[in-house]
Amino acid sequence: MDASRRKFLAQTLALGCSAAASPLVTPVTFASIPSDNRLVVIVLRGAMDGLDICAPLGDPLFTQYRPGLTKREFRDLDGYFALNENLADLMPLWKAGELGFVQAVSTPYRDKRSHFDGQDLLEAGLAETGGNVRESGWINRMLSLIPGAEQDSAFSVGRESMLILRGDFPVTSWAPESRVDMSPHGQLLLDAIYAKDPLFAQAGQTALTLAAQLSMAQMEGDAEDEDGEMMAEMLKSMKSSQAAQQASGLAAFAAERLKEDTRFATFSIGGWDTHLRQDRSIRNASKELQAALLTLHEQLGPVWDKTCVLCLTEFGRTVRENGSGGTDHGTGGAMIMAGGAIKGRKVYGDWPGLEDAALYEQRDLMPTADLRRYAGWAAHDLFGLSVAQIESTVFPGVDMFQNPGFLR
Amino acid sequence: MEQSFATKSAFRFGYGFSPTDRDVAGVDDLLAQLRGPDLGVAQFAGPMLEERLAIQRAYQQLRNTMKKGDDSVKPELKKATRLRNRMRGDDTRHLFQRAMMDGQGFRERIAFFWMDHFTVIPKGRAGNALWGNYIEEGLRPHITASFGDLLVSAVTHPSMLIYLDQVRSTGPNSAVGKRKKQGLNENLAREVLELHTMGVGGAYTQSDVRQLAELLTGLDFDKNGAKFNKRKAEPGAETVLGKTYGGDPAQRSHIEAFLRDVARHPDTARHIARKLAVHFVSDTPEQSLIDHIEQAFLQTDGDLPSVYGAMLDHPSAWAPLGQKTKQPFDFMVSSYRALGVTPQDYNKPSNGQINKRLMLPMQFMGQPLRKAPGPNGWPEEAEAWITPQGLAGRLQWSLSTTTRWGQDLDPREFINTALRELPGGTLKFAVAGAERRVEGLTLVLASPEFNRR
């Protein structure tokens, strides 16, 4: 175990209460700066199960921990790790060295396992929750360090500004109207709060399905009344919003800008909180992610070669499958990287193993590195920020240690 | 945990908590809201009647010119159309803004109650242009007076005359009736007795309806506003509920005299008492509550503040919450308030945004604004609102609204702002365990605790 890893493991923080992360299905944020490289950060909200996306099938213990979830098909990556079948269309990227993973990483967030606090810390790039955690995001601080970045060279797209871009560096925003849907986990929570109220329980069963369909059919029925003009207008904007709500739509929009002056884009994909029937519940989010990455790859053209995509999540999930075919909130997780600028076809990270003693609190994958270190090296290699700048301003308190060298 | 006075008051008699509102400390705090000036209309109101009619008239004239083939007025018509649509959007905006105000919850709930009791669904060319004025001038100045004042004003307002066809009713023996061979339309007369005053179980007969219809003839409206048209008034006196009104020449005051009498009728007292109890307290209120309100109504000749006071006095007004559900309008207003959205925040959004954020959601939730199912207004019972479609509308709206306004709210704090001591363990647990902030906030807004009152 190297020195930095030991130091990182020692950082088990006492956590206070804090404001929650800025969550949403689909904000896209952009920034343009005078460098030829591009960075895309996709925030995976809800705690993506890194062990299901990049599964350590090479360890026989894993099948014992997850008898149900390992019965599914996976695509072999390197003889030890295997790719979730829902991401199978990404295999050509892997083979081309344009897709990679980092295993056993996490933010410094520990123990409370709250999505809100976890996402806060991930986007703020800080070591502790509470206090000023919601004041600025690490990408905003990064922009402020890049010489030549202009006031209007950064702007955000999305119905809300993501914390990751919040801060003193001025950002303007563009907000597409988009429909939002409840995540599978949110639907379960809703069932739970309706359980004791028969009226709500009864209506709630079909309400969610209807909520997802609320839009076109009903709208069109009314388009001919006296409000026709206005209704038609609404209809138009709702149609464009439906296209925008898909992650691939956001990715396409991001790609357009990245081909121009924009050097930085971020958006989020939710739906990763898979407590129940994970074989099914992880499907949508994975498909959205896959579509987003493929869209970026297709539409960026030659710019893809200068692009690094990092997919980050607030924490991992339990090593063991739970009683309902899902997994619960954990600690160490995985980070996904893609793009022509990365050295992919490799699973990076210091894999801690799955023996009981190797687990964090005997339940979670042990985080062996701060994921901020990887994001920090990306900022270093792509935009020329110094290690000192990153350790003091972008990710205060991070130990950058050695460059893992995942960029070409 | 026992429900506090402030919580019961905010849910049952107001539009819920807002982060900036003061807690109601006692019944007198609620009644005090009714003693002051109408702060809602002072801040958020549309043009007066004459201006509204002028805007409508200009639009109508330009349209007629266009129809005759004169395209040169097209730009002008476009402007006039925009002005007219703008007025309608503002009426919607103002309805929400007034209800969202701090310190006025009870008064605003009372205003909504009467708007529903005297439902007008905009109809005809001037319908939409007049609707906001009906609320602002026709109803609201009288909701703190006597029921008689309110009744006279509501029933004789142009909006009501158009909506319930009074403008189509002509005394068969009047000058106009004889010349044009026109006759009575009983619509308004019937609804005055059945809905506005005595109630469907009241002691009136078809003959009373007929006689009242004759008495009401002459109430008319043209493009300049309401007027009494003697040439449409049926000659002679009418006997309604055993009392004779009018005689020649017909006068508007004859109609007012009847309205003031029926406003004090015991059947009216019982009908109004029951409606208040059902609207505010419970879908199935205790008889003793209705009796108590009814007594106050009779003893004060329908002095409305005394009537409201009687409702607030009764112990069942302070029984535990949960006996009703919020209607969509109340749900939206109380959600906005809990999220800290202020009435001023709604000054900016354009007409199109008003439609998208306020009108369309109400339609999805089952309460399309200005389009009640009939002159009897919106249903009261929880089952009418908490349907799969209605709940779907609430969910979808909550998701998009918390996305827009809830960026900086922590669901674990928001649940306290919105619900104080009300949430059970399950809800608290679910809200804290949501995967995204928006979903946490949405769980609060979609919860039975927030939607019941």
Image (tube, coloured by chain):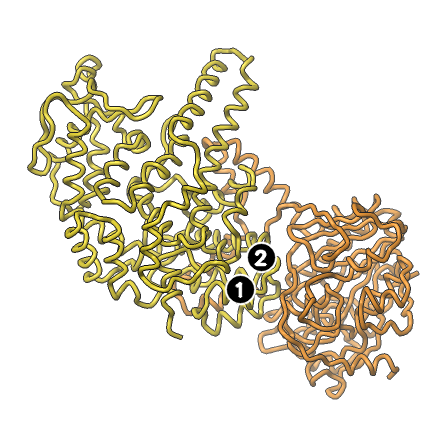
Chain colours: A orange, B yellow
Among the 4 quarters of the image, the one containing residue B170: top left
- Which of disc 1 and disc 2 is earlier in sequence? 2
Q: Quadrant of the N terminus of chain B?
A: bottom left
Residue A92 appears in the rendering:
no
User: Chain ID for label 2?
Assistant: B
Q: Residue at x 73, y 70 (%)?
A: A50
Residue B270 locus on image (x, y percent): 18, 51
Amino acid type for the residue under numbered disc 2: Gly
Q: Residue at x 60, y 71 (%)?
A: A275
Q: Residue at x 60, y 62 (%)?
A: B437
* Residue carrying label 1: B414
The answer to whether marks 2 and 1 sit on the same chain is yes
User: Chain ID for label 1?
Assistant: B
Residue sitting farthest toward the bottom: A357
Q: Residue at x 89, y 47 (%)?
A: A302
Amino acid type for the residue under numbered disc 1: Phe
Among the 4 quarters of the image, the one containing residue B134: top left
